[in-house]
Image (tube, rainbow, N blue to C red):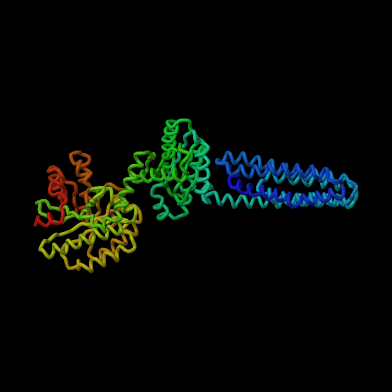
């Protein structure tokens, strides 16, 4: 299949070329027969060739009905037999003509046979075995003819005939290699040698139709944090890692008789064999995906680098021949991204429930794009207090209410805004509204030590972000206020582009902005980030605060605070809801507290009323 998949259409076109050869040459035989032989044999041959040509045209039309690669392969076998039979038929006329004593008929037979051989070598170049057998079948009679003439010149001509045969076969070989190479490049990935997206789509479309009464599954695999390896170690190491990953996938897929392809970048696809029941298919999909995940996560040694990588895998069960291949690929893609959203390094199977979730997200996404223009996004402010309960600052929180879909949690709409890029516009809106509130408070005599504003990492790394911040600070003269503006960035979003993040932080510090690391302890390599990032404040995540009654969690929070103290960082504990939590944190000399024990998030009017 890998060799022939790109030649089906090519051979399909050649059928009409071969039939056209009859139209161009048959009149010559009929005229020769009329002049020399009475046309009986020529007419018989002509009608025989017509029948063979009719069979060829039937094959030409049958190709349009070949829906699977297996059907196309069977069709290609019939075409090969047709081609061999068609070209071999000219040898019959050669043998018939050279038996006559009229030398002109000999010339006619030799010239036609040679021309037919050249045409066959050209047209059949894509079919290696067929072109060899056809050229030998056509040239051998000419060679034997010259040998049987038994004269010096005929022996020389016989030699030249052999040489011509070798030249034709050599030219056909080069043409075949060129076609094979060019089509391999068109259908395969240059780095791993696996089938590419184009190849995979064809195989998938064929499998859907071939297994219309059976079940197959499709795995879409995306490597987690592969960009980090490319950025830190270089693309050469990244390419070697992709090759090693593809080898592991191919080895495991070969055991299950599955097909592997690389769609591009760090994204791979695997298509399974057919199963008789949905349950068998589902169980094998889960088992195979887990095995695949396990072998991908095994360590790699590349150029003395010990690398570890995981993957997010989406699975689509295929059993509906009415759907297009791209639709199943889209289902697996949806499941894969859901696996990424769930923390990566996991497997998600596409189903109706997931489909409803995605449809809900799409609905939210559609309405979200008009949220700012329709003034649907409102800001709330959650006070931050010291150990005496005095309000020192606040955190700005975004809330969204839409008339059609109701209240939407920030945990839902913020990730959607980040994925779609709408977070750039939304983030600017939130920042400006927060600064406007700060201006109003300053004029009203409300003095806060600090105001914390969450900044999405996609917004933070946007090329226009620094200019946008400077423009807003100039517009509202933020530099004259005593209230400290703090940008909160989440630890879980700082795993990539650390160098650029540090660069942006240092530039924004020139505007007097300070930085807080939010959700500390929920990401990766936390201590290394504390060392490398020029932050001023650390927020202990509420997931730790809520479990302070657990001795191990309490020791962990104590360690975090001690490390922060040694690094001269201010400490804010969020999610404080119980008095024992506040008492424990107070003993550790925590700076600020935020949570329902003190205040819930308040709209601007209620927040101002506190003062």
- Give percent across and percent down for residue 204: 50, 42
Q: Looking at the picture, tell me which residue is in the foreground, 362 or 341.
A: 362
- Give percent across and percent down for residue 422: 31, 56
Please identify the quadrant where the N terminus is shown: top right
- Taking the image as shown, residue 576 lies to the left or right of residue 501, namely left
Please identify the quadrant where the C terminus is shown: bottom left
- Give percent across and percent down for residue 279: 42, 31
Quarter of the image for residue 281 reads: top left
Visible in this render: residue 168?
no
Visible in this render: residue 599?
yes
Q: Looking at the picture, tell me which residue is in the foreground, 246 or 459.
A: 459
Kindly identify the residue that appears in the image at 72 percent across and 45 percent down.
Answer: 132
- Give percent across and percent down for residue 171: 70, 52
- Taking the image as shown, residue 3 lies to the left or right of residue 576, namely right
Kindly identify the residue that appears in the image at 45 percent across and 38 percent down.
Answer: 318
Task: Answer above or below: position of 315 versus 398.
Answer: above
Q: Looking at the picture, tell me which residue is in the foreground, 395 or 26.
A: 26
Kindly identify the residue that appears in the image at 15 percent across and 59 percent down.
Answer: 449
Kindly identify the residue that appears in the image at 32 percent across and 53 percent down.
Answer: 418
């Amino acid at each position: 299949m890998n060799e022939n998949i790109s030649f089906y259409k090519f051979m399909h076109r050649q059928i009409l070329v071969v039939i056209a050869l009859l139209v161009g040459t048959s009149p010559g035989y009929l005229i020769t027969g009329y002049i020399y032989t009475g046309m009986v044999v020529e007419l018989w041959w002509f009608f025989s060739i017509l029948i063979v040509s009719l069979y060829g045209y039937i094959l030409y039309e049958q190709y349009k009905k070949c829906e699977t690669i297996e059907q196309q392969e069977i069709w290609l076998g019939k075409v090969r037999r047709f081609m061999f039979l068609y070209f071999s038929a000219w040898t019959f006329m050669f043998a018939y003509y050279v038996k006559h004593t009229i030398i002109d008929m000999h010339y006619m037979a030799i010239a036609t046979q040679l021309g037919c051989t050249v045409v066959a070598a050209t047209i059949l170049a894509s079919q290696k075995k067929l072109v060899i057998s056809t050229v030998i079948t056509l040239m051998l009679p000419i060679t034997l003819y010259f040998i049987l003439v038994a004269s010096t010149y005929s022996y020389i001509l016989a030699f030249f005939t052999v040489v011509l045969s070798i030249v034709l076969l050599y030219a056909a070989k080069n043409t075949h290699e060129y076609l094979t190479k060019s089509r391999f490049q068109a259908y395969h990935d240059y780095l791993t040698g696996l089938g590419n997206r184009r190849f995979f789509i064809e195989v998938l479309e064929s499998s859907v139709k071939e297994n219309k009464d059976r079940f197959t599954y499709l795995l879409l695999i995306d490597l987690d944090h592969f960009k980090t390896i490319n950025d830190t170690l270089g693309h050469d190491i990244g390419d070697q890692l992709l090759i090693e990953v593809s080898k592991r996938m191919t080895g495991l897929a070969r055991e299950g008789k599955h097909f592997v392809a690389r769609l591009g970048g760090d994204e791979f696809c695997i298509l399974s064999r057919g199963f008789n029941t949905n349950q068998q298919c589902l169980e094998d999909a889960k088992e195979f995906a887990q095995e695949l995940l396990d072998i991908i996560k095994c360590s790699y040694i590349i150029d003395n680098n010990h690398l570890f990588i995981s993957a997010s895998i989406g699975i689509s069960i295929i059993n509906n021949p009415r759907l297009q291949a791209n639709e199943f690929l889209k289902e697996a893609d949806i499941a894969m991204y859901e696996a990424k959203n769930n923390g990566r390094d996991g497997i998600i199977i596409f189903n109706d429930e997931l489909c409803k979730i995605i449809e809900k997200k799409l609905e939210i996404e559609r309405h979200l794009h008009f949220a700012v223009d329709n003034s649907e996004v409102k800001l709330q402010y959650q006070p931050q207090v010291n150990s005496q309960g005095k309000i020192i600052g606040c955190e700005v929180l975004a809330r969204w209410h839409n008339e059609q879909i109701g209240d939407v949690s920030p945990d839902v709409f913020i990730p959607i805004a980040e994925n779609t890029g709408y977070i750039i516009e939304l983030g600017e809106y939130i920042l400006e509204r927060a600064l406007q509130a700060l201006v109003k408070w300053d004029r009203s005599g409300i003095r806060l030590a600090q105001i914390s504003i969450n900044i999405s990492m996609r917004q933070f790394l946007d090329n226009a972000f620094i200019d946008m911040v400077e423009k807003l600070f100039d517009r509202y003269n933020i530099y004259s206020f005593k209230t400290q503006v703090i940008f909160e960035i989440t630890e879980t979003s700082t795993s990539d582009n650390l160098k650029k993040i540090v660069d942006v932080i240092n530039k924004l510090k020139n505007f007097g902005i300070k930085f807080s690391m939010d959700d500390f302890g929920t990401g990766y390599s936390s201590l290394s980030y504390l060392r490398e990032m020029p932050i001023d404040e650390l927020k202990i995540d509420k997931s730790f605060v809520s479990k302070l009654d657990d001795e191990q969690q309490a020791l962990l929070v104590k360690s975090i605070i001690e490390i922060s103290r040694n690094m001269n960082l201010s400490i804010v504990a969020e999610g404080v809801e119980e008095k024992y939590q506040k008492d424990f944190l107070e003993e550790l000399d925590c700076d600020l507290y935020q949570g329902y024990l003190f205040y819930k998030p308040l709209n601007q009017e209620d927040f101002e009323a506190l003062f």
